[in-house]
Amino acid sequence: MICTRGQHFASVNALPSASWAVFFLVGATLRPMWALPAFFVLSSLLDFASLATGTITDWCLSPAYWAVALAYAALWLGGHVYATRLHRDRWSALPRLVLALVVTASVAYLISKGGFYFFSGRYPEPTLTGFIVRIPQYYPRALGTLAGYVGLAFALRAIAIGAFARVAARSVRA
């Protein structure tokens, strides 16, 4: 998240923000509840630091900014539910992961982007129709970015598990 969020000293400019994936993965992998507010504070500090240094504008930092906290909570909860109820260390669990990502991304999108559209003050006279016509323009990228980062994380996890299993099997034979 530090490398892909905002425009600050550690940014990788070509990569989309990994924030949604980070919150999903934090929910899936870190058990203490304090991880959710800790990562929200981190994301906020990155945003406010970028604003203070002038590398981003205040466009997204409106009264609706705090809707993103609810969206991140939805992402965290989606990851937590996936890990505790749906995940299995088998390829057959992949459809469950895809379903969890689609549902979680949809909820987070409606909260985050809907909150911004209706409550930021950036859109004069926002309407439900006006919001709905924006969904096909922005939702696929949000879902794709989330799925890409989470897929990469799970692929790396599978590789690590496989490597450790091979090492353990060799040590048993030795």
Image (tube, rainbow, N blue to C red):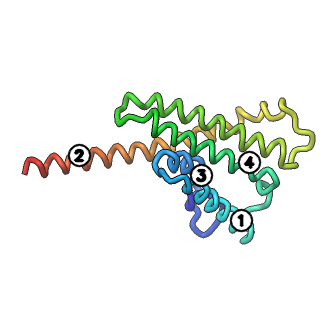
In the displayed structure, 43 sits above or below 143; it is: below
Judging by the rendered image, the residue that carries numbered circle 2 is: 165
Q: Earlier in the sequence, mark 4 or mark 3?
A: 3
Secondary structure of residue under mark 2: helix
Judging by the rendered image, the residue that carries numbered circle 3 is: 19
Q: Which of marks 1 and 3 is nearer the N terminus?
A: 3
Residue 14, image x and y in percent? 58, 55
Q: Earlier in the sequence, mark 2 or mark 4?
A: 4
Q: Which amino acid does label 2 sit on?
A: Ala
Q: In this image, 128 relative to 157: left or right?
A: right
Q: Which amino acid does label 1 sit on?
A: Phe
- Residue lying at 81% horizontally and 55% vertically, measured from the top left: 62
Secondary structure of residue under mark 1: helix
Residue 78, image x and y in percent? 56, 39
The CA span between labels 3 and 2 is 31 Å
Judging by the rendered image, the residue that carries numbered circle 1 is: 48
| Image disc number at residue 67 | 4
Q: Which of marks 4 and 1 is nearer the N terminus?
A: 1
